[in-house]
Amino acid sequence: GLATVGTIAGLGALVAFGLSMVNSFKRVVSPGLVMAFAVAEGVALGALSKSFDAMFGTGVVTGAVFGTFAAFAGTLTAYKVLNIRVGDKFRKGVVAAGFGMVALMLLSLVLSLFGVQTGLFGFGTLGLLTAIAGLVLGVFFLILDFDFVEKGIAAGLDERESWRAAFGLTVSLVWIYTNLLRILAIFSQD
């Protein structure tokens, strides 16, 4: 049932998180690790989507999928049309905010193991605020990804680096999807 789906989502997310940390800090990108991350993340997202579908209805998952595509297309269009340039301060700020959000998630998870519910990643007002902040952060991650790809091509980076770009884009899109899923779930409640 739903408990099994939750366990699968949790295990997939844990494996994906571990692989994402390894992939993020490896000097030389490993296509095998990127693929393993994609599989683990796919399992986690499939199970998460199934549980959200059961709890909130099909429209939430469908809306999050379409919203993620729209966020990708809109951000890419804005990046190109508005000729967005990524500065060092922006890059450092986005990375710091990303680490901060992950630290909050981990803290909230650890506290929940001791029965303390922060509400930061729940379905109330506080959860909505962190989901909106997460969605904005996901769009900023996409901008960093587009900048990496554009500068990598211009600099003639090794073709192997395309795996790093694919990994980054996948993480950003998953980040956007999961935050959109939460936002839509919150608004679908009575």
Image (cartoon, rainbow, N blue to C red):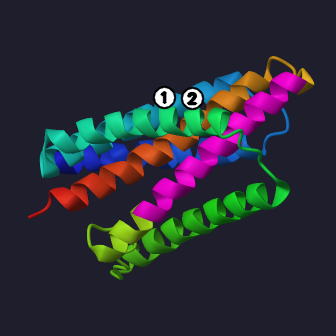
Residue type indicated by callout 2: Ala
- The majority secondary structure of the magenta stretch comes to helix
Quadrant location, the C terminus: bottom left
Residue 119: x percent and y percent? 34, 76
In the depicted view, which residue is nearer to us: 81 or 19?
81
Q: Which residue is mark 1?
A: 39
Q: CA distance from mark 1 to mark 2?
A: 5 Å
Asked whether the viewer can see residue 29, the reply is no
Residue 147 located within the stretch drawn in magenta: yes
- Single out the residue that lies furthest toward the right: 155
Quadrant location, the N terminus: top left
Residue type indicated by callout 1: Val
- Whether the residues at callouts 1 and 2 have beta carbons within 8 Å, the answer is yes
Q: Which residue is mark 2?
A: 36
Residue 16: x percent and y percent? 53, 42
Q: What residue do we see at 74% from left, 38% from top?
A: 147
Asked whether the viewer can see residue 186, the reply is yes
In the picture, measured across the screen, residue 179 lies left or right of residue 171, that is left
In the picture, measured across the screen, residue 110 lies left or right of residue 33, that is left
Q: What residue do we see at 70% from left, 58% from top?
A: 95
State which region is magenta: 132-154
Q: Is residue 96 above or below residue 113?
A: above
Q: Which type of secondary structure does the marked residue at label 1 adopt?
A: helix
- Single out the residue that lies furthest toward the front: 82
